[in-house]
Image: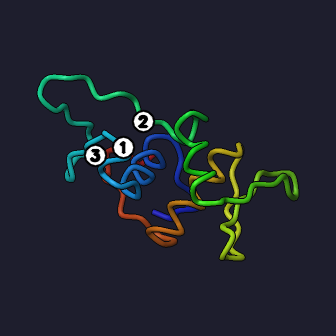
C-alpha cells in the first residue's frame, strides 16, 4: 500500500512497526495485524495518527516539520525534501515518519486495509 494513502489502523500499525520495541508496547500478529496480549494484560491503544500524546513525541524526536500548504497539512523530515500530506497534522506527520523508515510502499496486513 502507498505510504501516502495510509489511514486509520493501517497507519497506526505502520508507525508501530517503525518504533523500537521498548518504546511502544504494542504487539501485532504478523499474519492478521491483530493486537496481541502479553501475560493477560490489556494492550493500551496505540493511535499516534489521532492521539497527540503518542504522535507528538514522535514528531519532536524525529524533527518532523509540519505546515499548512495548498489547503492541506503537509510534513517533511529535516533531511528530506519529500512532502507527505494529510487531512490533519498528525496524519501527515505519521505518513512522513513511516515513509522515512519503511519507504513509499508498506506491506500492510489485508485486515487493516481501508
Neighbor class of circle 3 (other Cα within 10 Å; few <14, some 14-19, many 20+) is some
How far is the residue under mark 3 from the one under mark 1?
15 Å
If you read the primary sequence from the N terminus, does the residue marked by circle 3 or circle 1 appear first?
A: 1
Which residue lies under the disc numbered 3? 33
Q: What residue does disc 1 label? A: 24
Mark 2 or mark 3: name the one nearer the start of the chain: 3
Residue at (31%, 39%) from the top-left corner?
A: 25
Q: Nearer the viewer, residue 97 or 1?
A: 97
Query: Of helix, strand and loop, which one carries label 2?
Result: loop
Residue 70 versus residue 40 in the image, above or below: below
Neighbours of disc 2 within 10 Å: few (<14), some (14-19), many (20+): some
Circles 1 and 2: CB distance less than 8 Å?
A: yes
Mark number for residue 46? 2
Q: In the image, what residue occupies the spot 63% across and 51% down?
A: 60
Q: Nearer the viewer, residue 18 or 70?
A: 18
Residue 22 % position (x, y): 31, 48
Q: CA distance from mark 1 to mark 2?
A: 8 Å
Residue 52's disc number: none
What is the C-alpha distance between the residues marked 2 and 3? 13 Å
Q: Is residue 26 left or right of residue 97?
A: left
Q: Earlier in the sequence, mark 1 or mark 2?
A: 1
- In the picture shown, does residue 3 fall above or below 19? below
Residue 56: x %, y % from top left: 61, 42
Amino acid at each position: 500500500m502507498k505510504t501516502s494513502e495510509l489511514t486509520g489502523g493501517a497507519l497506526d500499525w505502520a508507525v508501530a512497526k517503525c518504533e523500537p520495541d521498548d518504546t511502544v508496547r504494542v504487539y501485532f500478529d504478523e499474519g492478521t495485524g491483530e493486537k496481541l496480549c502479553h501475560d493477560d494484560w490489556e494492550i493500551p491503544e496505540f493511535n499516534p495518527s489521532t492521539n497527540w500524546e503518542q504522535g507528538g513525541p514522535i514528531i519532536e524526536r524525529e524533527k518532523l516539520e509540519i505546515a499548512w500548504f495548498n489547503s492541506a497539512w503537509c510534513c517533511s523530515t529535516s533531511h528530506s525534501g519529500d512532502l507527505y500530506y494529510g487531512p490533519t497534522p498528525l496524519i501527515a506527520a505519521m505518513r512522513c515518519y513511516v515513509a522515512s523508515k519503511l519507504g513509499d510502499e508498506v506491506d500492510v496486513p489485508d485486515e487493516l486495509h481501508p
